[in-house]
């Protein structure tokens, strides 16, 4: 077996190996890219249910009397209307508007928020947040204390029913209940996900992660649920046209260009990056469907009417709708009704403009 000694591991590493997961280096973490096949796992999530280990994600707590004012300064979205038990998607920006990271905000109280950050950005984000702390604000990296599982798919409720739970499962998207038990294990359960499918994400103490994972796997047998790897997670988010940090947004790609206007409140008081985001943008994110054979890889040139207008940010098959697709960052002036193509290793592949999301659940 390949040596993963130098990689970070979630509490489920040995479990993934025992289940036959194909372990890869994912940003310094030893995680399963797949168990059976990416296609099978995607199909399970779209039609039944799938279970993902996302314990590599970071959790940073913001605590103190100035937590609200601090959050308003640090993120693009407005947290004013958030009540305890609500989640909200947002982006943290540099002064030039580029994205530090995209985050999910959990509000526990006026003086306590939790940010879910991308695994590869946890240390950078923690440093950024700490650097900008003011007044009565504590920034605490609690990532090592949490295990996180994503239970996604239309039959996720049947899995929870079979596992047994106490407390009210959040029914409204972007809400959570932090006082639940699932299979006898204390959990925070949120109506969130990164698949474009209905489902929940479950947070438990790191030491309870294996027990919760095993209980949910057992409970999922009745609906033929599959454990799923990061390959399926990426395909599912791609089908749903959800941005991935380092691809659709980055330090060089701001959230306006990425098409995240819903998470940017330019009418709220000053936040880091606001001035840059108010300026006219020169690029936009679009979707393309490949007509010719081939797959559009990231950084491939995008052509409109024969001229280069941008680059591919993510590309690949979208099995739920059929065909190969791409998301791309292109000039705002590019003609959506023009003749589109991507250039992959010197080979030009014809495309057609494709509205996003490529897949939307019924």
Image: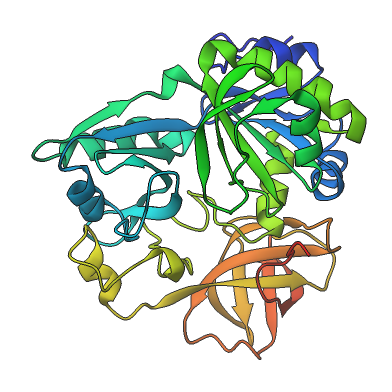
Q: How has the structure been colored for display?
A: rainbow
Q: Position of residue 3 (x, y in %)?
A: 64, 10
At horizontal 63% and vertical 49% (from top left) the residue drawn is: 171
In the rendering, at what x and y percent does residue 17 appear? 74, 13
> Would you identify the image quadrant in which residue 358 lies?
bottom right
For this rendering, which residue is in front, 48 or 112? 112
Query: Measured from the top left, where is residue 247 in percent x and y?
Result: 52, 53
Q: Residue at x 85, y 43 (%)?
A: 48
Q: In this view of the protein, can residue 228 be seen by the observer?
A: no
Q: Give the answer, above or below, for where 287 lies relative to 229.
A: below
Residue 250 in the image: above or below residue 125: below
- Between 78 and 163, the one lying in front of the other is 163
Residue 34 locus on image (x, y percent): 77, 31
On screen, residue 11 versus residue 35, left or right, reads left
Quadrant position of the N terminus in the picture: top right
Q: Residue furthest left?
A: 135
Position of residue 60 in the picture relative to residue 332 (left or right) = left
- The residue lying at 27 percent from left, 75 percent from top is 278
What is the number of callouts on the image?
Answer: 0
Q: Which quarter of the figure is the C terminus placed in?
A: bottom right
Horizontal placement of 12 versus 40: left or right? left
Q: Residue at x 79, y 23 (%)?
A: 217
Vertical relation: 197 (above or below) 275: above
Q: Nearer the viewer, residue 83 or 56?
A: 83
**From where the camera sits, is residue 62 visible?**
yes
Left or right placement of residue 118 versus residue 251 in this view = right
Q: Quadrant of residue 16?
A: top right
């Amino acid at each position: 077996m390949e040596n993963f000694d130098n990689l970070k591991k979630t509490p489920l590493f040995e479990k993934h190996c025992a289940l036959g997961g194909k372990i890869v280096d994912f940003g310094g973490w030893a995680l399963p890219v797949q168990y059976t096949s990416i296609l099978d796992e995607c199909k399970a999530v779209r039609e039944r249910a799938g279970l993902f280990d996302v314990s590599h994600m970071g959790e940073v707590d913001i605590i103190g009397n100035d937590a609200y004012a601090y959050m308003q300064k640090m993120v693009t979205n407005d947290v004013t209307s958030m009540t305890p038990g609500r989640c909200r998607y947002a982006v943290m920006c540099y002064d030039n508007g580029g994205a530090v990271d995209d985050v999910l905000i959990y509000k526990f109280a006026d003086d306590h928020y939790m940010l879910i950050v991308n695994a590869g950005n946890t240390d950078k984000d923690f440093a950024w947040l700490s650097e900008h702390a003011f007044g009565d604000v504590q920034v605490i990296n609690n990532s090592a204390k949490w295990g996180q599982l994503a239970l996604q798919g239309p039959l996720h409720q049947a899995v929870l029913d079979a596992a047994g739970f106490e407390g009210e499962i959040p029914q409204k998207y972007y809400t959570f209940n932090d006082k639940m038990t699932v299979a006898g294990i204390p959990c925070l359960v949120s109506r969130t996900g990164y698949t474009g499918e209905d489902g929940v994400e479950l947070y438990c103490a790191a030491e309870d992660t294996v027990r919760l994972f095993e209980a949910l796997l057992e409970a999922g047998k009745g609906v033929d649920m599959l454990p799923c790897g990061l390959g399926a997670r990426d395909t599912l988010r791609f089908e749903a046209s959800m941005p991935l940090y380092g691809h659709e947004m980055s330090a060089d790609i701001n959230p306006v260009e990425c098409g995240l206007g819903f998470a940017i409140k330019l009418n709220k008081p000053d936040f880091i990056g606001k001035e840059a985001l108010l300026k006219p943008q020169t690029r936009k994110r679009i979707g393309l469907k490949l007509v010719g054979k081939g797959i559009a890889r990231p950084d491939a040139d995008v052509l409109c009417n024969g001229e280069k207008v941008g680059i591919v940010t993510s590309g690949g098959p979208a099995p739920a709708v059929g065909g190969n697709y791409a998301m791309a960052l292109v000039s705002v002036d590019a003609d959506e009704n023009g003749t589109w193509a991507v250039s992959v290793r010197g080979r030009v592949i014809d495309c057609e403009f494709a509205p996003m999301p490529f897949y939307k659940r019924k």
